[in-house]
Image: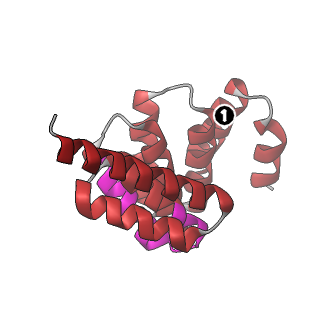
Amino acid sequence: MSKSSDIAERQLIQLYSEACKYHEQGDLEQARTCYLSLLQQLGDAPVILYNLGLICYEQKNYQEAKNLFLRAVKAAPEDVDSWFNLALSQKKCGDLEEAIESNLTLLRRVPDHADAHYNLGLCYQEVHRYDAAVTSYQNAITLNKDHLSICHRSIR
Protein backbone atom coordinates (compact mmCIF):
# COMPACT_ATOMS: atom_id res chain seq x y z
CA MET A 1 0.00 0.00 0.00
CA SER A 2 1.40 3.41 -0.91
CA LYS A 3 1.89 6.12 1.67
CA SER A 4 -0.80 8.35 0.10
CA SER A 5 -3.41 5.58 0.05
CA ASP A 6 -2.50 4.76 3.66
CA ILE A 7 -3.11 8.40 4.60
CA ALA A 8 -6.41 8.46 2.67
CA GLU A 9 -7.56 5.31 4.43
CA ARG A 10 -6.72 6.77 7.83
CA GLN A 11 -8.64 9.94 6.93
CA LEU A 12 -11.71 7.87 6.00
CA ILE A 13 -11.47 5.95 9.26
CA GLN A 14 -11.13 9.24 11.14
CA LEU A 15 -14.17 10.69 9.35
CA TYR A 16 -16.21 7.57 10.08
CA SER A 17 -15.21 7.74 13.76
CA GLU A 18 -16.27 11.38 13.89
CA ALA A 19 -19.60 10.58 12.24
CA CYS A 20 -20.28 7.84 14.78
CA LYS A 21 -19.27 10.12 17.67
CA TYR A 22 -21.59 12.89 16.46
CA HIS A 23 -24.41 10.39 15.98
CA GLU A 24 -23.98 8.97 19.48
CA GLN A 25 -23.94 12.50 20.93
CA GLY A 26 -27.17 13.36 19.11
CA ASP A 27 -25.57 15.90 16.78
CA LEU A 28 -27.42 14.49 13.80
CA GLU A 29 -26.57 17.29 11.36
CA GLN A 30 -22.82 16.95 11.96
CA ALA A 31 -23.08 13.17 11.72
CA ARG A 32 -25.09 13.49 8.51
CA THR A 33 -22.46 15.80 6.99
CA CYS A 34 -19.69 13.30 7.79
CA TYR A 35 -21.67 10.34 6.46
CA LEU A 36 -22.54 12.20 3.25
CA SER A 37 -18.87 12.98 2.74
CA LEU A 38 -18.03 9.31 3.23
CA LEU A 39 -20.78 8.28 0.83
CA GLN A 40 -19.36 10.64 -1.78
CA GLN A 41 -15.93 9.08 -1.41
CA LEU A 42 -16.93 5.43 -1.01
CA GLY A 43 -20.08 5.07 -3.07
CA ASP A 44 -22.98 2.98 -1.76
CA ALA A 45 -21.23 1.55 1.29
CA PRO A 46 -23.96 -0.36 3.17
CA VAL A 47 -22.94 0.74 6.66
CA ILE A 48 -22.92 4.41 5.62
CA LEU A 49 -26.32 4.11 3.91
CA TYR A 50 -27.67 2.36 7.01
CA ASN A 51 -26.37 5.00 9.41
CA LEU A 52 -27.69 7.83 7.22
CA GLY A 53 -31.03 6.04 7.13
CA LEU A 54 -31.08 5.93 10.92
CA ILE A 55 -30.40 9.65 11.10
CA CYS A 56 -33.22 10.42 8.67
CA TYR A 57 -35.56 8.16 10.62
CA GLU A 58 -34.61 9.87 13.89
CA GLN A 59 -35.32 13.22 12.21
CA LYS A 60 -38.71 11.88 11.10
CA ASN A 61 -37.72 12.15 7.44
CA TYR A 62 -39.19 8.74 6.71
CA GLN A 63 -39.20 8.98 2.92
CA GLU A 64 -35.47 9.72 2.78
CA ALA A 65 -34.84 7.01 5.39
CA LYS A 66 -36.79 4.56 3.24
CA ASN A 67 -34.75 5.46 0.16
CA LEU A 68 -31.47 5.03 2.04
CA PHE A 69 -32.49 1.68 3.52
CA LEU A 70 -33.58 0.54 0.04
CA ARG A 71 -30.12 1.37 -1.25
CA ALA A 72 -28.59 -0.40 1.76
CA VAL A 73 -30.49 -3.66 1.14
CA LYS A 74 -29.55 -3.52 -2.55
CA ALA A 75 -25.89 -3.09 -1.57
CA ALA A 76 -26.06 -5.77 1.17
CA PRO A 77 -29.15 -7.98 0.77
CA GLU A 78 -28.12 -10.13 3.74
CA ASP A 79 -28.18 -7.22 6.21
CA VAL A 80 -31.04 -7.95 8.58
CA ASP A 81 -30.95 -4.55 10.28
CA SER A 82 -31.35 -2.73 6.97
CA TRP A 83 -34.37 -4.88 6.07
CA PHE A 84 -35.90 -4.27 9.49
CA ASN A 85 -35.46 -0.50 9.29
CA LEU A 86 -36.62 -0.44 5.68
CA ALA A 87 -39.88 -2.07 6.77
CA LEU A 88 -40.28 0.44 9.62
CA SER A 89 -39.68 3.35 7.23
CA GLN A 90 -42.09 1.97 4.65
CA LYS A 91 -44.75 1.63 7.33
CA LYS A 92 -44.16 5.22 8.48
CA CYS A 93 -44.55 6.36 4.85
CA GLY A 94 -47.87 4.52 4.63
CA ASP A 95 -46.47 1.98 2.15
CA LEU A 96 -47.97 -0.93 4.03
CA GLU A 97 -47.82 -3.56 1.29
CA GLU A 98 -44.13 -2.74 0.77
CA ALA A 99 -43.56 -2.96 4.52
CA ILE A 100 -45.29 -6.35 4.58
CA GLU A 101 -43.02 -7.60 1.79
CA SER A 102 -39.89 -6.29 3.51
CA ASN A 103 -40.88 -7.92 6.80
CA LEU A 104 -41.56 -11.19 4.98
CA THR A 105 -38.18 -10.97 3.24
CA LEU A 106 -36.52 -10.43 6.60
CA LEU A 107 -38.41 -13.34 8.15
CA ARG A 108 -37.34 -15.67 5.32
CA ARG A 109 -33.76 -14.85 6.33
CA VAL A 110 -34.32 -14.84 10.13
CA PRO A 111 -37.55 -16.69 10.98
CA ASP A 112 -37.17 -16.07 14.72
CA HIS A 113 -36.99 -12.25 14.52
CA ALA A 114 -39.69 -11.41 17.07
CA ASP A 115 -39.73 -7.68 16.30
CA ALA A 116 -40.26 -8.35 12.58
CA HIS A 117 -43.22 -10.62 13.43
CA TYR A 118 -44.66 -7.88 15.62
CA ASN A 119 -44.18 -5.18 12.96
CA LEU A 120 -45.66 -7.48 10.34
CA GLY A 121 -48.68 -7.89 12.59
CA LEU A 122 -49.07 -4.11 12.83
CA CYS A 123 -48.97 -3.81 9.04
CA TYR A 124 -51.48 -6.60 8.55
CA GLN A 125 -53.77 -4.98 11.11
CA GLU A 126 -53.63 -1.64 9.30
CA VAL A 127 -54.65 -3.26 6.00
CA HIS A 128 -57.46 -5.15 7.78
CA ARG A 129 -55.90 -8.60 7.37
CA TYR A 130 -56.75 -9.50 10.93
CA ASP A 131 -56.16 -13.27 10.78
CA ALA A 132 -52.65 -12.68 9.46
CA ALA A 133 -52.09 -10.00 12.12
CA VAL A 134 -53.11 -12.38 14.92
CA THR A 135 -50.77 -15.06 13.55
CA SER A 136 -47.90 -12.58 13.41
CA TYR A 137 -48.58 -11.39 16.95
CA GLN A 138 -48.72 -15.00 18.17
CA ASN A 139 -45.36 -15.66 16.52
CA ALA A 140 -43.89 -12.55 18.17
CA ILE A 141 -45.16 -13.63 21.59
CA THR A 142 -43.91 -17.19 21.15
CA LEU A 143 -40.45 -15.86 20.36
CA ASN A 144 -40.41 -13.13 23.01
CA LYS A 145 -42.82 -13.11 25.92
CA ASP A 146 -42.14 -9.37 26.37
CA HIS A 147 -44.31 -8.82 23.29
CA LEU A 148 -47.40 -10.11 25.10
CA SER A 149 -48.45 -6.78 26.60
CA ILE A 150 -47.45 -4.84 23.47
CA CYS A 151 -49.50 -7.14 21.22
CA HIS A 152 -52.43 -6.97 23.61
CA ARG A 153 -52.42 -3.15 23.37
CA SER A 154 -52.10 -3.31 19.56
CA ILE A 155 -55.24 -5.36 19.03
CA ARG A 156 -57.46 -3.22 21.24
Q: Residue at x 64, y 55 (%)?
A: 24
Q: Residue at x 66, y 41 (%)?
A: 134
Secondary structure mostly seen in the magenta stretch:
helix
| Viewer-side residue, 120 vs 21 | 21
| Viewer-side residue, 52 vs 89 | 52
Query: Which portion, as a residue range, is magenta?
Result: 55-73
In this rendering, position of residue 35 left or right of residue 142: left
* Image location of residue 115, percent across then percent down: 62, 40
| Viewer-side residue, 46 vs 9 | 9
Name the colouring of the figure. secondary structure
Residue positioned most to the front: 3
144 is higher (above) or lower (below) than 120: above
In this rendering, position of residue 9 left or right of residue 86: left
How many numbered badges does the structure rendering display?
Answer: 1
Quarter of the image with the N terminus is top left
Does dot 1 land on a helix, a strand or a loop? helix
The amino acid type of the residue labelled 1 equals: Ala
* Image location of residue 133, percent across then percent down: 61, 46
Q: Residue at x 56, y 43 (%)?
A: 132
In this rendering, position of residue 30 left or right of residue 152: left
Confirm whether residue 101 shows in the render: no
Residue positioned most to the left: 2
Q: Residues within 10 Å of mark 1 (few under 14, many from 20)?
A: many
* Image location of residue 95, percent across then percent down: 44, 66
Residue 72 sits inside the magenta stretch = yes
Quarter of the image with the C terminus is bottom right
Residue 36 sits inside the magenta stretch = no
64 is higher (above) or lower (below) than 107: below
* Image location of residue 52, percent across then percent down: 44, 61
Confirm whether residue 49 shows in the render: yes
Residue bearing the label numbered 1? 140
